[in-house]
Every structure is written in C-alpha cells, then in structure tokens.
Image (tube, helix red, strand yellow):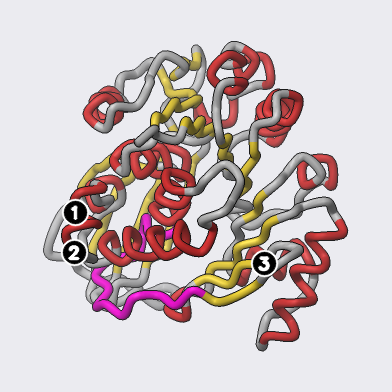
C-alpha cells in the first residue's frame, strides 16, 4: 500500500508541563508535587509526529533556535521517520516554548511564546518547494506567520496539491488565506470566530458550512470534542461519533486527529468518513496518555486497539 505524502508547515515548541489538582484562582498560590517537565511540542511538530507515526511519508517545514533546546525534539522527528531536511535555524530567536498546566480532570491551559516560529518566512517556505509540489496534502496551523502559510498553499495550489488548514490558535484570518484552503478543520470555538456563527445545533453547523463554502473551501470538518466530528462537502454531511474514553490529558488530541486524518485520506476524498473515524481512534488513544508528542500513538497501536 502506498503511503500518503504529507508536508506539515508549522511550529516547533519545547513544552513545559506543570501538573496541578486544579487551576488556581486569580491571586491564589497552589503548591505542586512535581517540578516542571519538558517535552517536544508545538502544533506543527505534533501534527508532523502524528502523521509520521501513522505512516504517512512526512516532511516538516519549521524553524527552531540555535541554542539547542530543540535538539531532543529533532531526534524524535527522525524516530518518527520525518524528513528533517527543511527544519531551519533562526539566528536571533530562541526555540518556541509553551507553558502548559494540566489539571487532574485532564483539562489544560496553554501559554505560548512563538520565538523562532515567528521568523519562518515565505522565502524559507520557498526552499521547500520540491516536497510541497510532490505532496498529496500540505497542512498548516496558526503558530507561524500567515505569509509563510500563504506561500506554502500557493505552491500547493499551483501544483494540484490539497491544502489543509487547522485555524488554531483561533485568530481572525485574511480571506486571501481562506481562498487558498481546500479543507479546513476548526473546532467549535475556531469555527465561530471565523464565521461569526455560534454552533448550538445542526442548523448552526449547516450555516457555518455554507459560510466556508462561499469562501471557496470545499471540505469542512468541525471537531466537536466528546460528540465527535461533523463533516460536510457539497455532496454529503454527517457526524462521525467520538470514542468514549477516560481522558487523562487532552493536550495533543486535536493535532493527533489532523496528522492521523491526512495520513489516511485518499487524494480524491473517497474515504473521507473512514479517515475521520481513524483520526478519532488515534486521538482517543492520545488523551488517555500524559503529554503531547509522547502520547501520540503509532499506526500499529491504533489498529491493535480498534481491530
């Protein structure tokens, strides 16, 4: 079976975790039982790890600092069989960092310092033109400059490559980027920010989908947390249910979903619902484990659990 060729254009962070019984109230001090721990993170890196572990032929375009904080993450990329040729080094910025607090019930808060991620330029992306033109899917998120994403998507669209946008973290986006997007994968909050429509029922979801259709986006997936994933194309729409599991840490669930989705999706989208189901399976395993990249499963793990 041939593997999907996927290019991820996105962020690399060093994730710094603190585990707490509950989140502190404003002005409150809480003691913790364990000191801060460091792991590889960043939405782009998480999605690249997911795609690689789930056996897509993955190339990652990103930027890190030259202080060496990301060295251990790059080794993880190589272990996931990711092409690291297009991981660049910033001269004057540190590797991006995320400060993550996780409560006992599996919820999290995240503060992100962009660092080297925010120096990734359109020129940097042009250096990765060859793998982009040869890809089946090019995926981007919003922890890097919009100009870099637009450049990647322009190259992709000019060469018949499907573009996939995960509009996270949620920000207002230029129509120029949305016009270059074939598949968009927001959660409910991100979908509302972009469309102005609050999703409370099926009618709201249909209105949201119509908004994205009018922008020229042909496939919409809205992740609904425990409810699953609503998807729509011009020909079909449905909700693919989530798998009921006990969540320990939800940090990389959405990123696992996206990496898993593009690792399985046929170029003609003929297995759209099946790819979503596989992505739900993969993310259900991630939330049952601690951490971000360390929690992302391999293809064999997903298949063995959901035989």
Which residue is found at the position 61% from the left and 15% from the top? 129
Q: Element at badge 3?
A: strand
Question: Nearest the camera: 20 or 5?
Answer: 5
Q: Element at badge 2?
A: helix
Q: Give the labeled residue for mark 2.
A: 305
Is 245 placed above or below 169 here? below
**Taking the image as drawn, is residue 95 in sight?**
yes
Q: Residues within 10 Å of mark 3 (few under 14, many from 20)?
A: many
* Coordinates of residue 302 in the picture (x, y in percent): 24, 57
* Coordinates of residue 300 in the picture (x, y in percent): 20, 49
Residue 195, image quadrant: bottom right
Decide whether residue 98 is among the magenta residues. Answer: no
Magenta-colored span: 240-254
**Taking the image as drawn, is residue 142 in sight?**
no
Question: Nearest the camera: 264 or 206?
Answer: 264
* Coordinates of residue 6 in the picture (x, y in percent): 48, 33
Q: Give the labeled residue for mark 1.
A: 301
Which numbered marker is on residue 232?
Answer: 3
Q: Are marks 1 and 3 in contact (CB under 8 Å)?
A: no
């Amino acid at each position: 079976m041939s593997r999907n060729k996927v290019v991820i254009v996105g962020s690399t962070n060093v994730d710094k975790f603190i585990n707490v019984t509950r989140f502190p109230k404003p002005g409150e001090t809480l003691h913790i039982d364990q000191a801060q721990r460091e792991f590889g993170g960043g939405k782009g890196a998480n999605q690249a790890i997911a795609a690689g572990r789930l056996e897509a032929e993955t190339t990652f375009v990103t930027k890190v600092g030259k202080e060496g904080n990301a060295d251990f993450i790059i080794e993880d990329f190589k272990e996931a069989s990711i092409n690291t040729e297009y991981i660049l080094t910033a001269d004057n910025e540190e590797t991006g960092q995320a400060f993550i607090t996780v409560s006992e019930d599996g919820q999290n808060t995240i503060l992100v310092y962009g660092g080297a991620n925010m120096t990734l330029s359109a020129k940097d992306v042009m250096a990765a033109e060859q793998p982009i033109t040869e890809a089946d899917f090019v995926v981007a998120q919003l922890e890097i400059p919009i100009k870099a994403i637009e450049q990647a998507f322009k190259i992709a669209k000019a060469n018949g490559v499907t573009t996939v946008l995960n509009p996270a973290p949620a920000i207002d986006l230029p129509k120029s980027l949305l016009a270059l997007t074939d598949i968009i994968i927001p959660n409910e909050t991100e979908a509302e920010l972009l469309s102005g429509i609050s999703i409370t029922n099926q009618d709201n979801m249909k209105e949201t989908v119509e908004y994205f259709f009018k922008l020229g986006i042909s496939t919409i997936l809205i992740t609904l947390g425990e409810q699953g994933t609503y998807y729509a194309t011009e020909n079909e729409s449905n909700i693919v249910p989530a798998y009921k599991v006990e969540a320990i840490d939800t940090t990389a669930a959405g990123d696992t979903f996206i990496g898993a989705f593009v690792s399985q999706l046929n170029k003609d989208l003929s297995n759209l619902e099946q790819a979503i189901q596989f992505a739900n399976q993969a993310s259900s395993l991630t939330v049952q484990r601690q951490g971000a990249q360390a929690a992302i499963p391999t293809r064999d793990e997903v298949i063995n659990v959901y035989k």
